[in-house]
Every structure is written in C-alpha cells, then in structure tokens.
Image (cartoon, rainbow, N blue to C red):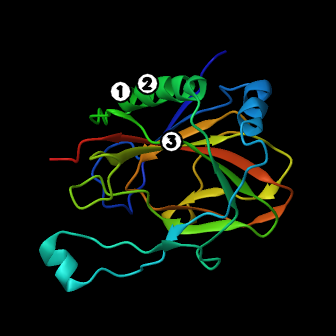
Amino acid sequence: MKKHFVMGFLRQVKLFVTNEWLSFKGVLDSETCNKIIDQSNGNFISPYVNRRSQITEKEILDGKLQYDYGEDALLRKGEVCWINEKWINDIVWKYMFEANERSGWKFDIAGIAIPQLSKYKKGDFYSLHNDGAGDNNSETHDGMVRKLSMSVLLNEGYEGGEFMFENDYVPDIGGIGSILIFPSCKPHRVAPVTKGTRYSLVVWFVGPPFR
C-alpha cells in the first residue's frame, strides 16, 4: 500500500522543531482496525485525567510535580480500554520509527507505554491537554517519559470528534486507518462527537528524559 506523508508546522507552539506532526494516511485496512477495536471485548472504563490546573511555586522550585488523577466530565468524557498486544505494538512501532527519522526529531525512544483504546460516543470529548513534557519533572513509566504520541483512527461513520491542536488547528490526518504522530508535549484535544461513535488507538512512546 502506498504511503502518503504529511508534515505540519505550527507557529504558535513552544517546541522548537521544524515538523510539529506527521501523518500516514490510510495505512491500516479496515480489517486490522476492526481487529484492534475487538481487543476490548467490551471492557471499557471511564477515563482518568489530571484534575490539577495549576503548578505551585514550591513545585517549580523543587522540580517535583504533584498529580491528582480521577474522573472529571468537564475535562474528558468517554471510555477507554488498555490493550497490551505484541502484534499491535509491532505495527505502531514501525510507523513511530519512520516518523521519528523522517521528521528529523530523532528522539531517543526506548519503549511503548501500554496503548489505550478510546471510545467517544455522542457528546463525548477530551479538552485541551498534553501527554507529557519529556523532562525530568514529567510523570514516568518506570523511569521513562512520554516523548512521542500517536493517534490511530479506527473507524468512520461518525460526525464531530475532530482531532485538534492549539487554536483549533485540524491537521490533515486522513480517514480510517490513518496514523498521526507528534511530540507528546504538544497540546491537543478531541472535539465533541455529534453523531455516532468514534474509536481511536492512543499510543505513547517513551524514553529517557530530554537533557
């Protein structure tokens, strides 16, 4: 299958890299997408978010951030399921590797955090957030921090639910089976779904903190 590469440069960000995101359009067929969705076996749960909106002066001075994870329907509404399947990890890893090289990021990536299958029904959304800063103050996965994030679009037949960066910028991702990859520190959100159900696979690639 022919790959279509799309890179994006956003001026209103604080990350100083040339390419802010990269997408692979329609690289997964519908059979693979449905197989990924089926891994949930219907075992979805309510998602947790960090409910803290401010950092204290003490945290800034100490370099130790505090988190308050829990449900908050004002910040995120939907369902999630954690999926740890080697065949899925093998698929997403090769696209991450190619994007990391092609984009020029060339981040030091050591592994994958357990992927999350996200389900958004009518009225569900995820407010603006980032997945991690990649520095020594970030929350860790066994000492590793999130450096690259990936969103895989798994279905169609819904309305709304657009993936957006800051200032409601909608990247040219593509349709079902498309993969978007971007540095984890980039703020992004999922607009409310207005019709149907949206499924996506979210993957975080981790490595040692930036130096």
At horizontal 60% and vertical 21% (from top left) the residue drawn is 3
| Percent x, y of residue 14 | 31, 61
Q: Is residue 87 visible?
A: yes
Dot 3 surroundings within 10 Å: few (below 14), some, or many (20 or more)? Answer: some
Residue type at mark 2: give it. Answer: Glu
What residue is pinned by disc 2? 98
* Front residue (pair 177, 90): 90
At horizontal 56% and vertical 36% (from top left) the residue drawn is 84
Specify the quadrant that holds the N terminus.
Answer: top right
| Percent x, y of residue 83 | 61, 40
Question: Disc 3 or 2, which lies upstream in sequence?
Answer: 2
160 left or right, relative to 88: right
At horizontal 68% and vertical 59% (from top left) the residue drawn is 45
Dot 2 surroundings within 10 Å: few (below 14), some, or many (20 or more)? Answer: few
Indicate which disc residue 114 carries: 3
Question: Disc 1 or 3, which lies upstream in sequence?
Answer: 1
Marks counted in the figure total 3
Label 2 secondary element: helix
Q: Is the Cβ of the residue at disc 1 closer than 8 Å to that at disc 3?
A: no
Indicate which disc residue 101 carries: 1
* Front residue (pair 147, 20): 147
Q: Is residue 8 visible?
A: no
Label 1 secondary element: helix
Name the image quarter holding residue 127. bottom right
Residue type at mark 1: give it. Answer: Glu
- Give the answer, above or below, for where 191 lies relative to 144: below
At horizontal 64% and vertical 17% (from top left) the residue drawn is 2
142 left or right, relative to 92: left
Q: Given the current orientation, which residue lies at the most extreme top position?
A: 1
Q: Is the Cβ of the residue at disc 2 closer than 8 Å to that at disc 1?
A: yes
